Image: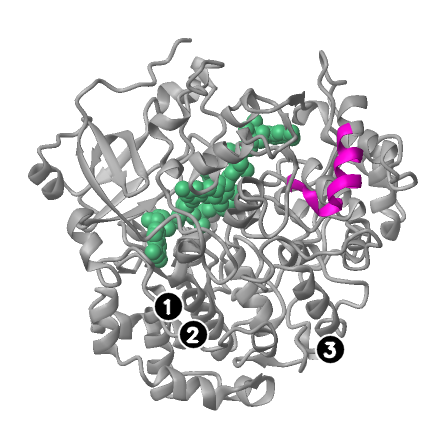
Amino acid sequence: MDEITEKLARIKDKWGPEALLGVGGSGHGPGDPNLWRFCNLWGTPNYFHQGKNCGEPEYFAEWAVYGAISEIGNTPVPGVTKCVIIWGSNPPVSYGSNWWKAAEAARTQGMKIITVDPRLSESAKGSDLWLQIRPGTDGALAYGMLKLIIDEGLYDADFVNRWCLGFEELKAFVAQYSLSKVEAITWVPAAKIAEAARLYATSKPADIMFGLGTAHQGKGTFSAVLGKAFLRAITGNVDVLGGNRFGDVPEQTSFVEQMHWDKIIDHPERTRDNVSSEVWPYGSVKALKLFREAMSNVYPKGLPGPAKYMIYPAPSSVWTAILDQKPYPIRAALIQASNTLGTFANSKRIAQAFTSGNLELLVVLEQNLTPTAQLADYVLPAADALETPNIFVAVGYWGFNDLYNAIPRALDPLYERRTDYDVFRDLGNRLGQQGYWPDSLEGWYDRLLEPSSVKFEELAARNDPQLAPPVREKRYLTSGFATASGKVEFSSSMLKKLGYDPFPQHEEPAWSPVSNPELAKEYPYILITTGRNRHFQGSNLHQIAKLRRLHPHPLVQLHPETARQLGIAEGDDVYIETPVGRVRQKARLFKGINPQVVHAEFGWWYPERTPDSSLSGIWESNINSIVPDGPEHASFTGDSSFRALLCRVYPAKESAPGSIAH
Ligand SMILES: Nc1nc2c(c(=O)[nH]1)N[C@H]1C(S)=C(S)[C@@H](COP(=O)(O)OP(=O)(O)OC[C@H]3O[C@@H](n4cnc5c(=O)[nH]c(N)nc54)[C@H](O)[C@@H]3O)O[C@H]1N2
Ligand SMILES: Nc1nc2c(c(=O)[nH]1)N[C@H]1C(S)=C(S)[C@@H](COP(=O)(O)OP(=O)(O)OC[C@H]3O[C@@H](n4cnc5c(=O)[nH]c(N)nc54)[C@H](O)[C@@H]3O)O[C@H]1N2
Ligand SMILES: [Mo]
């Protein structure tokens, strides 16, 4: 810790606070929010966590149009929800069994399910209507549905008149998206589009789900996520129970204050915005400030959890800031709970950055010696969930809701392991952040819980150790929407202020058969990466032998006809290749996929070979090593395109890697 402290202090002196990069994981525990606190107090706007790959564009669209984010994973409410569009998501696999049980219960009471997915996913199989879309064209589909709903007068005119601005502009804009045009773009038959639009608009309340499928489309993303937001609003389904109810703002805790986002706005040592703010202003300190002002009607204490997204730089710019030291140098990185090489795009470039001489310090806090950890100067072994007292559940860590469970630690950390909190506390206390870091994590929880006047230990000792918010809806009736006008803004003032077109046309992803037919001659298949599987979480859990026996190899789904043409049989090893490189996975023949679409798993490495010179086989099957990055492939927020790419596929000669040693 002394060495790390000394190096960090030196780097700050010489290069400024912005030369530190923070990378966090996906809400595994209190480590995430404490990394943000550390970075905000330190003065660097160069941090992100997995939210950057995890649907950020969809949140931004919702913030821009109606100033709030729909409840994550909004479970259908039996007897209330009348229709759900599962759009770019697959809840039977991604959200655990309770979601689908609730959906089944709601169905017996008349709820209809529509799924928009290029694959006959588990969701699509269980749906009343399946729209098999061409990857990367969801924006055109949404606009076509909007046009039909407006033309046929199926929108909620009362809500639109009273609560929405810019309806006439929206109407004029979507007029270009006739069903025949949309059919040609999306490959979804016009009759099905019309059926879906009518069913959605006339069944109330109805919910359009958040989904990674619509957020991972590069250039296709902007229109897709805005189109979904427009549909929710025009039908009056925003902040309605059973529809798109908004997530709860943390009120039972001082979460908002404890994250110290205000500190990064006014930090005395910070002289620069993040490294991608010029290219992607949506995702900069400037944006955070604008949103804070515009939303103060609803969030007087400051922005809730999702505020962090406003600061996130684009990952591709961060790697450039290390490799080329432009627009300014990043010299040190603190990584917590992220196997960055497995889960971010173009991972060979990330490995180059992490091993570059420009990076003076790489610290990784991990529970496993991941390929990313193997590149570190210092690996700090992190305590696991049993060794860490806990207060939030899942998305609570990201400040998306106001539900808190208190769980005491079951045992003290074994061996040299320490909680992430203890590491940030010790760094913070050595680096001028005294007063912000109570001695124990429980002590920090006590601070968080001050608004509820309960101590952590007391809450954890209860039979039902949770603070659950009352179910609220339609909060706009008292406070208005959290936008500059207090209304739903179809023509978003925030987008305009940040230099974006509030009505973006459907744009083809950079590598699509339409935008790049030359490339498509060489790489004839559309590549989508993940649909999750039941056995792993991101690039984690592959080390657990029991799970690996259930799912020993990475699988790529191909249509049987495509496989036949390529001379590939079920279970064969195949190469998937893009202009960036190739990886090997095992063929899984699947009739439910369009013959032109290929679906690969992500997150693969071979922990049983740890550590070895191949970084535990991270380059063999890890699809992200062939996913491109950079401005051409990024969405309007600088996020990466993990779907809607181009590839070719062919049989691999050698046998597959990844036999399980244990
Ligand atoms: N078991 C398990 N559960 C998990 C996770 C895990 O790793 N394992 N990860 C968790 C995390 S971090 C997240 S963010 C959630 C994500 O959960 P989801 O939002 O459900 O995301 P995915 O399962 O990745 O993808 C959903 C669907 O998008 C489809 N899709 C691909 N391209 C397109 C497209 O262009 N348009 C449309 N409309 N659909 C497309 C895919 O075929 C897939 O069926 O799951 C969480 N749950
Ligand atoms: N191609 C492609 N790439 C994707 C996606 C996709 O759909 N397609 N999805 C993206 C999405 S939505 C997400 S959320 C990410 C998932 O990306 P990550 O969040 O990076 O995913 P995990 O694989 O869960 O890895 C987290 C790491 O944290 C470690 N860990 C777990 N708990 C703790 C803890 O308490 N403390 C510390 N210090 N370490 C801990 C684990 O050992 C593991 O190595 O992947 C993204 N990447
Ligand atoms: Mo995620």
Which residue is the site of mark 1?
A: 139
**Circle 1 — which element?**
helix
Left or right relative to 3: residue 141:
left
* Numbered badge on residue 478: 3
- Cα gap from disc 1 to disc 2, whole angstroms: 9 Å
Q: Earlier in the sequence, mark 3 or mark 1?
A: 1
Which percent across, then down, holds residue 379?
Answer: 64, 21
Report the mark closest to the observer, 2 or 3: 2
- How many numbered discs, if any? 3
**Residues marked 1 and 2 touching at CB (< 8 Å):** yes
**Circle 2 — which element?**
loop
Magenta residues, start to end: 7-22
Which residue is the site of mark 2?
A: 504
**Circle 3 — which element?**
helix
Does the beta carbon at disc 2 come under 8 Å from ligand 1?
A: no
Which percent across, then down, holds residue 396?
Answer: 67, 47
Q: Amino acid at mark 1?
A: Gly
Q: Main secondary structure of the magenta part?
A: helix
- Cα gap from disc 3 to disc 1, whole angstroms: 32 Å
- Cα gap from disc 2 to disc 3, whole angstroms: 32 Å
